[in-house]
Image (tube, rainbow, N blue to C red):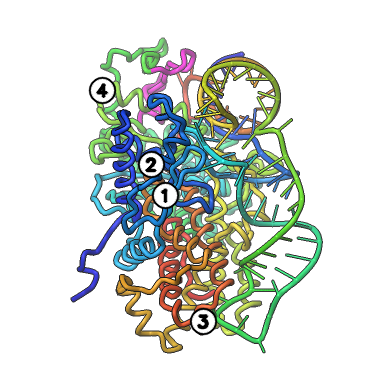
Amino acid sequence: MDPRQDRAPTGDPWAELRTRVASEVASRLGALGATVRPADLEREIAAPPEGMGDLAVPLFRYAKPLRRSPQDLASLLADGFPLGRELTSAASAGGFLNLTASVPWLAEATFARVFSAGDKYGHGTAARGKVCVEHTSANPTGQLHVGRSRNSLIGDTYARVLSAAGYSVEVQFYVDDIGRQAATLVWIWSKPGAQWPASVREKSGVDPDRPRPEGMKPDEWRGKPYPSASEVVKQDPEAAREVSELTARFERGEIPPAEYRKVPKEILDGVLASLARVGVHFDEFVWESDLILDGSVRAAVDRLSRTPHAVREEGGALAFDASSYGLPKDLARVMITRSDGSDLYIARDVAYHARKLAGFDRVIDVIGEDHKMHFRSLVALLSEMGFEHRPEVMHYAFVNLPEGKMSTRAGRAVLLDDILDEARERARKEVSLRREDFAPEEVERVAESVGAGAVRFHILAIQPDKPIVFRWEEALSFTGKSGPFVQYSFARAASLLRKAAESGQGDLLAGILRGETRYLPIPDPPDPREVELLKSLSHLPALVTAVAESGSVHLLALYAHEVSERLNTFYQSVRILGGETGSLAFRLALVAAARQVLKNVLTLIGVEPLDRM
RNA sequence: GCGCCGGUGGCUCAGCUUGGACAGAGCAGCGGCUUCCUAAGCCGCCUGUCGUGGGUUCAAAUCCCACCCGGCGCGCCA
């Protein structure tokens, strides 16, 4: 009989207790004459300051209607509060009812969930709907810089969290292969070298008649002529005409998609290779030009042109008056097509979102804050077309450099590839210094992983709303609040468990991992550092739920740091193997649970858990 | 000019949604810890008018208003 089958508990260890406390308090307040909804009260339950228990019920708002002081109410409630097996004390303090959880109960509740759910600990148990997360969607015009990759990291992490919360998630990359930018690059590369404008040849340093140089990524090589070519297109009307002609021919079906997309595809592949280094992957690529070729864009424009707020401009361009959708007056005119009848980006975006809304319960876009207005317009257009649910958006602020805005054209951008390479170099030095026992391949593997972990964690640990001023030294930190610190803590736990198995505790450990933790002897009193760690471990399920709700992915990184810190403090202060026999099982369980929690949260934030580093 | 977002110790950031108990971390600085489970660690010390001013409240970093500073945006680019 698998013990996991035996009433395997799931979810948040605290959930039931909170509900019980809320209903108890509500009924007691009710007896005093107040009308209190348990659900409201449950929401109000907070965490008291350290050392004052685990759950705090604020009583201030009930004081006035009951004509008693909050302090009185708290003492009244604390007196004879039913503790059961979960609670060890109920105390009144400054208008709060503070409840302290019993450590044996919490240990049992947490361990049972961690070990029965394993890699799924913290994940939601109910299946939710289908959600589409679109992120990155960078124009295929060259290498990704760290500003752009903030989009990828936030989007990727959010997708992981939604999936953990029970959604069926599809991650999409929208490839704009037909806008002016990509078209410019397709245009320049469609010409033999002899026809390249001199300025492009010079500035890009690319000879298109030669194959891609050894060791150069395709996104770098293919992207090199972009700034200068785009300059030419801006200056020279003939060049601009050629670009328009090229896209027009493609839209008429005169150029096979595979041929037209050759260059964008190569750039995309290069970008994807870089993103893969930081653990970012996609399920689906939607090529913008397909939406044109299959008629979706035309259908969307037709539909929009027949809506009451459609406006035909003087030159013949189609616009849309969005003032009734709450857009600021001077921004309310949204342009949909050009005077020459060609459609603008938003027209194609509407077609794309129409398709997504039809196929998913939730549609989430991760886009930069510079697109806020665009998104609002998009939502207005979709509503006008009659879509009932709206796409949701996660905006993030830009990553700037100390010397100003990041700009590839101004040569002021930090490329994702470059920061990752530098991170790997530094990690390699650290690893070789510390681990002389590692084979060269392992040094390499760990260095890549630690470097990527540092970069990924650094970007992710900051609230998306906050502009980041990017500094190399900070992004490459391997200590303190960093990815490698969390990886290190995980490796340390993993190492200890290996040692435990080697030193004759294999059976004990195997039992713990099978979830046989119900009658684990708990030290009495437990060390406060054991309790702090245990409490952190118990908080993952509630956190995942909250982040799935709010999109505050940075909280996961901060949580990973908190667990690591508490694990290290605990680890440093007590002896686990070869310590007091009475506490061995409990401490091993703590380490095993911490290892599992760190693994799960690292996976959520896309940093690789390393068994050795 | 208008709109949206940010402004918390020397630096980088949590906390603000749902006001509550002394505002928390990391880095930097200073001082300790390794015959012992990975020192990428641990312990201690130092540093704060929570941009400014007003308001609401028993209670404001958190809510409201005004202003200041920074970022982003403001119809035929994406």
SS assignment at label 1: strand
According to the image, label 2 marks what residue? A77
Q: CA distance from mark 2 to mark 1?
A: 8 Å
Query: Could you tell me which chain the residue with mark 2 belongs to?
Result: A
Q: CA distance from mark 4 to mark 2?
A: 62 Å
Q: Tag 1 or tag 2, which sits nearer the N-term?
A: 2
According to the image, label 1 marks what residue? A90
Residue at the location (47% across, 52% down)?
Answer: A53
Residue at the location (31% across, 28% down)?
Answer: A33
Q: Are marks 1 and 4 in contact (CB under 8 Å)?
A: no
Up-down: is A380 above or below B36?
Answer: above
Query: Could you tell me which chain the residue with mark 4 belongs to?
Result: A
Residue type, label 3: Gly
Q: Is residue A443 magenta?
A: no
Magenta range is A326-348
Q: CA distance from mark 3 to mark 4?
A: 74 Å
Q: Tag 1 or tag 3, which sits nearer the N-term?
A: 1
Q: CA distance from mark 3 to mark 1?
A: 33 Å
Q: Are marks 2 and 1 in contact (CB under 8 Å)?
A: yes
Total residue callouts: 4
Q: Tag 2 or tag 4, which sits nearer the N-term?
A: 2
Q: Position of residue A538 (x, y in %)?
A: 40, 58
Residue at the location (36% across, 22% down)?
Answer: A341
Residue type, label 4: Arg
According to the image, label 3 marks what residue? A579
Q: Tag 2 or tag 3, which sits nearer the N-term?
A: 2
Q: Tag 4 or tag 3, which sits nearer the N-term?
A: 4
According to the image, label 4 marks what residue? A303
| Residue A15 located left or right of residue B42 | left
Q: Nearer the viewer, residue A161 or B22?
A: B22
SS assignment at label 4: helix
Q: Position of residue A220 (x, y in %)?
A: 55, 54
